[in-house]
Image (tube, rainbow, N blue to C red):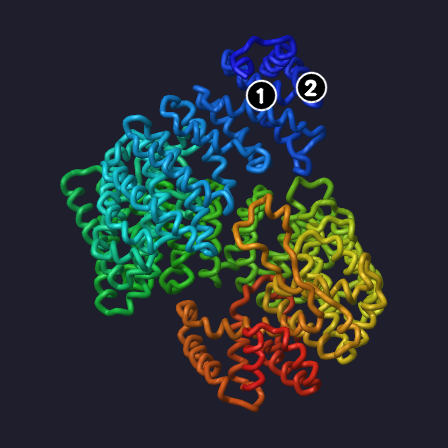
Amino acid sequence: MANDIHGAVDQDQQWLLNCLSATLDPNHEVRSFAEASLHHASLQPGFGSALAKVAANRELSLGLRQISFLLHFIKKHWQEGDESFEHPVVSSDEKARIRRLLLLSLDDSYRKMCTAISMAIASIAVQDWPEDWPDLLPYLLKLINDQTNRNGVHGALRCLALLSEELDDKVVPTLVPVLFPCLLTIVSSTEVYDKHLRAKALSIVYSCTSMLGAMSGVYRTETSEILIPMLKPWMTQFSSILNQPVEAENPDDWSIRMEVLKCLNQFVQNFPSHTESEFMIIMGPLWQTFVTSLRVRSVDSSEDLYEGIYDSDGSEKSFDSFVIQLFEFLLTIVGSTKFVKVVMNHIKELVYYTIAFLQMTEQQIHTWLMDANQFVADEDEATYSSRVSGALLLEEVATVAGMEGINAIIEAAKERFNESQREKAAGSLVWWRLKEATLFALASVSEQLLEAEDSGPVRVVLRDLLEQVIIEDNGSGVHEHPFLYARIFTSVAKFSTLISSEVLEHFIHAAMKAIGMDVPPPVKVGACRALSQLLPEANKGIIQSQMMSLFSSLIDLLNQASDETLDLVLETLQAVIKSGHELSASIEPIISPVILNMWVSHVSDPFISIEAIEVLEALKNAPGCIHPLVSRILPYIGPILNKPQQQPDGLIAGSLDLVTMLLKARMNSPIDVIKAVYDICFDAIIRIVLQSDDHSEMQNATECLAALIAWGRQDMLTWGDSGFIMRSLLDVVSRLLDPDLESSGSLFVGSYILQLILHFPSQMLPHIRDLIAALVRRMQSVQIAGLKSSLIVIFARLAHLSVPNVEQFIDLLITIPAEGHDNSFVYLMLEWTKQQGEINGAYQIKVTTTALALLLSTRHAELAKVNVQGHLIKSVAGITTRSRAKLAPDQWTVVPLRAKILALLADALVEIQEQVLADEEEGSDWEEVQAEDVEADKDLLYSAGVTSFSRPNSEHLEAMAKLFNEDQEDGYEDDLISVSDPLNQINLASYLADFFVKFSECDRQLFDHLCQSLTQTQYSAVQMVLNC
C-alpha cells in the first residue's frame, strides 16, 4: 500500500497524469481533448482507484493531484439509484481500494488536500457507512489519539466534522462515550494543539450534542445518562476558553470561542436541567468574553476584522460572525425561564454594553457612504450582522423582563446619550456613533416601549428622553454626520404617537425639505423612510403647502436612484400621492409618464416594477385620476400585447400586471374603464394564453381575464359577438387544463374558472361534464399542491351549484372515468380528503368545507363504498435519516370516506374554537373594540358546555366565524370572489353547527357510528355545538 502513496508511476498512471495535466492547459482544444479522454476512461474498470492513487501520491505536485475528478467520479458512479448516477457502477473490490487509499491519505500535510480527501470520504460514507465500511470510525479514532501525527489529527477531525452531519440516533449513543473523551483531550491540550484544531474538535461536539438534543424528546433518560458524566469536564473547558480576554487580530481565538458558544447553546436549549447546576462556572468567563469583545470591536472599528475571510475548511473567521454567535447565546439565556434569572441581576449592565455593540464601524460607514443601496438593504435587515443580532437581544430583554427590562433599556439609553454628549464636548470626532446607536437601540424595541407607554411615568420619561435626543444638535452637522440624521428621521417615525405634535410637524417639514436639498444620500434615505410612514397620518392642512415641491423633489430623486433606493423613493411617492389626494389630479400628467417610463426600464425587476405599478394604482384611486391614467396607459399597452413576440423579456407579463391593476376595483372602476380595457386588450390576452409558452405571461394573462370577467360580468357578452366571446373564454379553459401543460402555466386557472361559473352560469351549464373530465385529467398531472387545491375548490363550488340535487352531482362524477381509479368520484374524494387540510383562504375553506358537508348529507350509496387515506402511521421512534427514509417510506391508514369527511368537518370546528380561545395570546393585535367583543365571545365558549338541549347560540357562532374570517389573509383573488359569490357570506361556524345538529337528528345511528372514529378533541368539538 505504501507504493500507492509514494511509489513509482507506471505507464497507465503516466497517461492519467498527462491527461490531468492537460486539463490545466490554457489552450481550449487541449483542455477539451483531455476532458473527453478522461470521460471515456471513467467508463473503464479501475479508473476510480487510479484517480485515488494519483490523489494519494504525495511525491506529485499539488496541481496534478486533482481530487476534484475523483469527487466527480464518486458522485456519478458510486451508488445506483442516486439522482446524479451514471453507468457503470464501481465494483465492490474497487470501492474497497478507493476507501483504503483515501483513509491512508487523511494525514496529508496540505490542508486543502486534506479537506478535499475528507469530503471524498464523507461522500462515500453517506452511502457505505456503517454497513459496508465498519472500519471507518475505528481508524478515525486511532488517528485522533495519535498526538505524534498532527496532520492525521487534523484530517480525522475534518472528516468527523463532515460525517457528524450524517450521524443518526443509532450511531451517536455508542459513538459519543468513545469519541468525546478523545475530543476533550484535544481541546484541553493547549500546549499540543493550536486553536484551529481545538475549534474543529468542538465543532464535532456541537454536531453530536445537537443530535443528542434532537433525540432527547424521545430518549430523554438515555441521552441524559450519556451527557451527565461529561457535562462537568466540558463546562470546565468552556469556562477556561471564555475566561481569557478576547484577542484582537486573532481569528482562531474568535473561532474557538464561537464553537464553545454553539455547544453551550445546545446544552442550554436541550438539557437545561442538567446544565443549570454547572452554569454558574460559565457566567464570569462569559461576561469576560462579552466585555472584552466590545473592547476589540471599539479598538479595531476602523478595520474590517477579517470580514469575508475563511479558513481552509471553508469556515468563516470574521469577528462579526463571532459576535453574532455571542448574541445568539445570550438570546437563548434571556429566553430561557431557567437561565434568565441568572442575568436578571445584571440586566442593566447587559443592556448598557449591548447598546455600545450597535455602533457603526468604520467599514460600515465607508460601505454605506459609497453605496446607498447597500445602506437601504442593510437597514431593511436583508444583511444579518452583529448590529442586528444585538438589537434582537434588546427585543428579547424587553419582552421577557417586562417593565424591569423596559426601564433598564431607557436608563441605559439615557446614560449612553449623555456619554455621547460628553465625548462631543471633549472634541471626539466619533461622538455621534454612540448617539446613533442609542436611537437605533430604542427604535429596535419601539413596539415594546410604546406598549409600555400606558404607564404614566414611563411615557413621560420616554417622551422626554426621545425629544431630548432628537432635538439636541438638530440643524447642524448634517453633512458631517449624515447617518445620525438619517437615524433621527426614522426614530421620529417609529415614535410618532409619543412625540409632541409640534416636534412631529417640525421633522415632517425637515424631511420634506431634506429630500430637495444637497445632502448626503443617507439623510435622504432617512427622510424618505420617515415620510412614507408619517404622511398617511399627518395633518393634511399643515403639509399641503409643500406637497407640490415635494412631488417635484421626489421626481428628481427618481432619476438619481437605483435598486433599493429606487424602491424606497417609489414607496415614499406612493405615500405622498395618498396624502395629497386632491392635488394628485393636477400632478398626474407629470408623474404618470415618469413612472411609466421607469416601469418600462425596470420591468424585469419584480420589486421595482411592482412598486411602480403600486404608485400608479395610488394615482388611479385618487379623485379625478382614473380616466386620464387609463387613457395614457392603454394606447401604449395595446400594441405591446398585440405583438408579444417582438417585445423584450418581461414586458408582456409586466404589461398584463399593469392592465390587471386598472381592472382592480377597490372603489369599483367605472364600467367604461372596464369596456375600454376589453376593447383594446381582450383579443390579445386570449391569444397570449393560447399561444405563449412563457409561464409568467400565462399566469398574468389568466389573472387579467379573471379580473375582466369579475368586473365586466354579463355586460362583457354585449361588447361583441357573445358566441365568439364565450368560445374564446372556453378555449382558454381548454389550454390551461391541458394535462400536458406544465403546472406553473395553469397556476391561476382555478380563480379564472370560478369567475366563469359565477358570472356565466347559464353559458357554462352545457359544458359542465366536459369541464369536470378536464379538471380530473389536469389534477392527475399536477405537480404543484396549490394548483391541485384550487381545482378542488372548483369541484366544491360545482357541488354547491347542484343544490338541491347534490346526489345528481355525485352521479355525474361516477359516470366520468378517471385513469387508475373506478371513476372520477373515487379519485376526487381520495385527493380532496388528502388536500383539505392544506387549503388556504377564508373563502376557499368555507366553500370546500361546506361542500363536504353537502356531500355527506346526501348519504349517497357510493359514499359507503369508498375508502381514503387516514392518518400517518408513525415509524419506529427515532431520527429519520435519508437512508432510513428510503428503506421505510411513510405509511398511512385507510379509513371509510364518510368517517374521514366527518373528521375533517370536526377539524374545522376545532380550529375555529381554538382561534377563539387563543385570543389571549393574540390580544395585542386587535383593536380595542374587537378585544372587548372577543372577551364576550370567550365567555360564551366557556359556558357552552352548560347550555344543553338548545340550538347553537348565534352570538357564540358569530364570534367563531368572525375570528375565522379575520385570521385568513386577504388576497386579490379573494377580493375578486368576495364581491361576487354569495357563499362568501356563509358563517362557517353556524353552518357546521347546523349540519351536525341536522345530521345527528336525521340518521342518529349512522352519526353515532361515524363519531366512533373521531379523536377525543374532534368529538368534544362536535359535542360542544350539539349541546349549545
In what element is the residue under mark 1? helix
Q: Position of residue 714 (x, y in %)?
A: 75, 69
Left or right of 169, for residue 1001: right
Neighbor class of circle 2 (other Cα within 10 Å; few <14, some 14-19, many 20+) is some
Q: Which residue is mark 2?
A: 41
Residue 674 position (above or below residue 644)? below
Tell me which residue sits at (69%, 47%) in the image.
695
How far apart are the alpha carbons under marks 1 and 2? 14 Å
Q: Taking 755 as reference, is 577 left or right? A: left
Check the picture and name the quadrant holding the N terminus.
top right
Above or below for 158 versus 451: above
Q: Residues within 10 Å of mark 1 (few under 14, many from 20)?
A: many
- The amino acid marked with disc number 1 is Ala
Q: Position of residue 325 (x, y in %)?
A: 36, 43
Closer to the camera in the image, 154 or 358: 154
User: What residue is drawn where x is 66% and y is 65%?
Assistant: 870
Indicate which disc residue 942 carries: none
Of residues 573 and 845, the one nearer the viewer is 845
Front position among marks 1 and 2: 1
Of the residues under marks 1 and 2, which one precedes in the sequence? 2
Q: Residue furthest bottom?
A: 949
In this figure, which residue is indicated by the disc labeled 1? 52
At label 2, the amino acid type is: Ala
